[in-house]
Image (cartoon, rainbow, N blue to C red):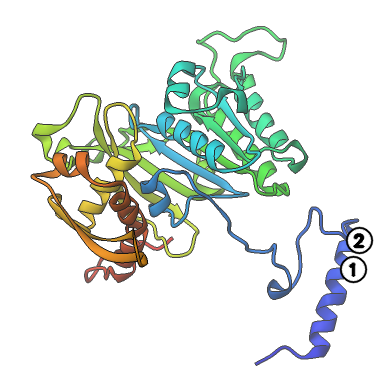
Amino acid sequence: MPLSNEKRKQAIKMMTKFLKDHDDEDQTKIKIGFLKDNPDLGKIEKLPTGLIAIDTLTNGGLVKGHVNLIFGGEGAGKTTTFFNIIKHCQEVIKDFLAGYVSAEKSLDREYAEQIGVDSNELIVMEGETAENNTDFCNVCADPENGYDLLIVDTLQALASKQELYKSSGAERSTEDNSMALLPRVYSQFFRMYTSKSIGSLTLLFGSQVRTDLSNPMFAKEKQTGGNALKHYNLLDIEMKRVADSNWPTGADDVPPNSFVVRLKLEKAKIMGRYRGNTIDMYFKEGKFEHKFNVVAISKKLGLHDGKSLKYPKVYESSHGYQACTEEFKAKGFNDFYNKIPDEAVEYLAKRIPEEYTKQVLDYIPAEGEEDGKA
């Protein structure tokens, strides 16, 4: 039943008074109103990463204006992923300002530039304490400072101030008991950060995992740093290296410095994507190459068999532009990848999100199985 005009007027009067009492009639800090009348409420915008696996898994990319988290073990490809995201955004988005907090203090300038990061357009910060990092994030959240993307790599790398120094200012010894301080720092930070009006800044955290041996029979990997790391994010992606048998041509044909990493949505408050969705991403000879990932992912989705492909092609003739169906054939997957025309790669790149979404929405959990929705 529709709301009566009298009740609507009462609600508007209450909201107007509330904003006036809190000195925020322009709604610069507090957002309030009927959802239909306020386009800023509940609006989810995405930042495309340029990595087709991540953009497909997340239905468009990282969530702007919110906290995003990518976590995984050592060597899963987190830092390479971060550099690729920065590179792509610098190339396709005008006047794009990115910040990179090198908490591990292991930034490799040559590697970043080799991937394609424009070092002249990237601000790098190396702090002394975890508080330095979180305070920097809070400052960057102010829209007046112009940041579009801020990456922290990684959360667990630095100690808190109380863990490093005594109240007297002297440095602590490793024999001093200062455990469990980092979770408190992050819990406070997340509350402060989400209380701000952060505009369209995309905040991306990298997080490490440790092996939880509290139950030796069921040892599993978990994040350290407290439960706050799980509560305030709109998007959580796990990166985990999987067996070489997942390589498109099998375990016996994996090139040097290559592996498969499985992306899994652990939390996704976004339309059309559910907790538990997975997709494979391919690290080939030192990088997440777009073409190889398109060919490999589309094969796994069943868009081709690794030996042949029919795709639409437009060519120019004396009668103008004509459309036809072209068939591409190869001897095997490697030959397919090396010789596939660029227009066929573009065709597959457009089909991957469509096919993946179709398979996600068509999936029916087995009896007794959780549907995995967030």
Residue 19 falls left or right of residue 57: right
Q: Residue at x 27, y 27 (%)?
A: 285
Q: Amino acid at mark 1?
A: Lys
- On the image, the x and y values in percent for residue 215 come to 28, 38
Q: Amino acid at mark 2?
A: Asp
Residues packed near mark 1 inside 10 Å, few (<14), some (14 to 19) or many (20 plus):
few
Q: Which residue is mark 1?
A: 17
- On the image, the x and y values in percent for residue 63 come to 54, 51
Q: Residue at x 34, y 30 (%)?
A: 287
Which quarter of the rendered picture does the N terminus lie within?
Answer: bottom right
Q: Which residue is more in the foreground, 238 or 174? A: 238
The answer to whether one can see residue 123 in this image is: no
- Number of numbered discs present? 2
SS state under label 1 = helix
SS state under label 2 = helix
Per the rendering, the mark at residue 183 is none
Q: Residue at x 43, y 54 (%)?
A: 58
- Rounded to the nearest whole Å, what is the CA distance between mark 2 and mark 1? 6 Å
95 to 366, vertically: above or below = above
Q: Which residue is mark 2?
A: 21
- On the image, the x and y values in percent for residue 368 come to 24, 69
Q: Mark 2 and 1 residues: CB-CB less than 8 Å, in contact?
A: yes
Q: Which residue is more in the foreground, 172 or 290? A: 290
